[in-house]
Amino acid sequence: MSDPARGWRPGPGLLVAAAFIGPGTVATASRAGAQFGFQLLWALLLAVAATIALQEMAARLGLVTRRGLAEAIRDSIQPAWLRWASVGLVLTAIVLGNTAYQTGNLIGAGAGVSVLTGAATQPAAAALGVGVGILIAVGGSGRIVIGGLMAIVLAMSTAFLLTAAAAAPNPAGIARGALVPSLPQGSTLTALALIGTTVVPYNLFLHASAVQRRWPASEDLRRALRSARLDSAAAIGLGGVVTMAIVVTAAAAFFTADARPNSPSEFAEQLTGVFGAWGRRLFAAGLAAAGLTSAVTAPLAAGFTAAGALPASASQAARERLTRGTAVAVALVGAGLAYTLGKSPTETIVAAQAANGLLLPLVAAFLLAAMNRRDLLGEHRNGPLLNAIGVAVVLTAFALGAKTLAPLLG
């Protein structure tokens, strides 16, 4: 049994936060602030609260049942035809959604490399995607690399927090934007993207599996649950503060000005006056690091989801092959799409986040169904408050998604 003091050691929550503080977050939050000022902060505040609640559910599912989310879905639905139809739907949605997400990750990372080195964004993004695919294919864990990238992301986060403070924004405007929901004309897709880039569907699958490695079955369950809740709330809360700082920085720098950056590289260039001479390279390095960190986690989460959908009788070797094969496929397809779609980096990244927002109601609904099963979780099943939060997330994401799709279907 672990030392109780170790419950404060960072766990999977930091990985979840690092996954959603990717280039999509930077691009989406920057666009939200530059175009709409503080008016969409309410969507971000909702997204952070929802993320903490949903990730706590996923972690509790993993710790109590020692199953991943895909496995819980597979074993929870009757009759058999509906079970496999549901598993197939979730699997398809997660793999396709992660491919879109991966494309945005690589384009963002490529844009950062482009600013740092002068290389073209598309070839840089594709090369990074192929590199991630090779790393996964040969079985490299990349723990040291990922740890280094997380450190750079945290450094970038510190820069955004300091810059937001230095911009001296209007506190009343921030409070109004955070507490009074509004959707200015043309803001629906950006609001959906803010939710999609924070409440990332694949993180629910990733978290349910990761907590089992961080807190093995030999741990005291109640202590593990407390540690996991603290880990998730602290890491995701920090991620939310950083994202809000990006919105505030962009709003202070661009909302009342004529300039409207259209890509991460333009954003880096135009922030030079706010950050100082070093701001351009710091932003670019953080963007590249954030993209690479997310580009490693997204394919792996797709792989874990695919393996969890296999029948319970499947061997461990078969699960590992499917995990790795799916992850490599997502990495390489994402690399190809990044090369093809990289001419409009910000548009592609924001669209990828919106795609994940459209997947959120489906995944959250399955999670809620699993978390209310007495036979699966016993006394650890959801209470009324968490169910209310979950239903609110599903309905909000569904409404925003429907409003976004309505003009396309009309």
Image (tube, rainbow, N blue to C red):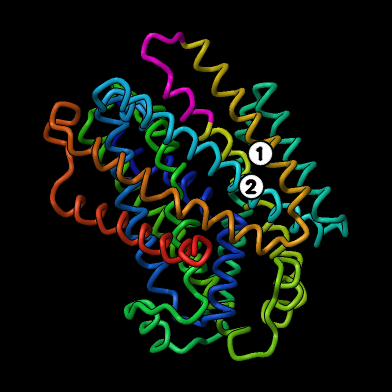
The image's mark for residue 69 is none
Image position, residue 84 (x, y; %):
37, 24
Image position, residue 132 (x, y; %):
70, 35
Residue picked out by circle 1: 145
Disc 1 is placed on an element classified as helix
Who's the residue at 49% across and 65% down the image?
Answer: 410
Who's the residue at 75% across and 53% down the image?
Answer: 110
The N terminus - image quarter? top left
Q: Nearer the viewer, residue 53 or 99?
A: 99
Residue type at tag 2: Leu
Residue type at tag 1: Val
Residue 304 within the segment the image draws in magenta? yes
Residue 169 located left or right of residue 394: right
Above or below: residue 20 compared with residue 244? above
The total number of labels drawn is: 2
Who's the residue at 65% across and 28% down the image?
Answer: 136
Who's the residue at 64% across and 53% down the image?
Answer: 152
Residue 87 located left or right of residue 146: left
Residue picked out by circle 2: 149
Above or below: residue 375 compared with residue 271? above
Image position, residue 326 (x, y; %):
59, 27
Residue 274 within the segment the image draws in magenta? no
Q: Which residues are magenta?
A: 303-315
Disc 2 is placed on an element classified as helix
Q: Nearer the viewer, residue 187 or 247?
A: 187
Q: Are marks 2 and 1 in contact (CB under 8 Å)?
A: yes
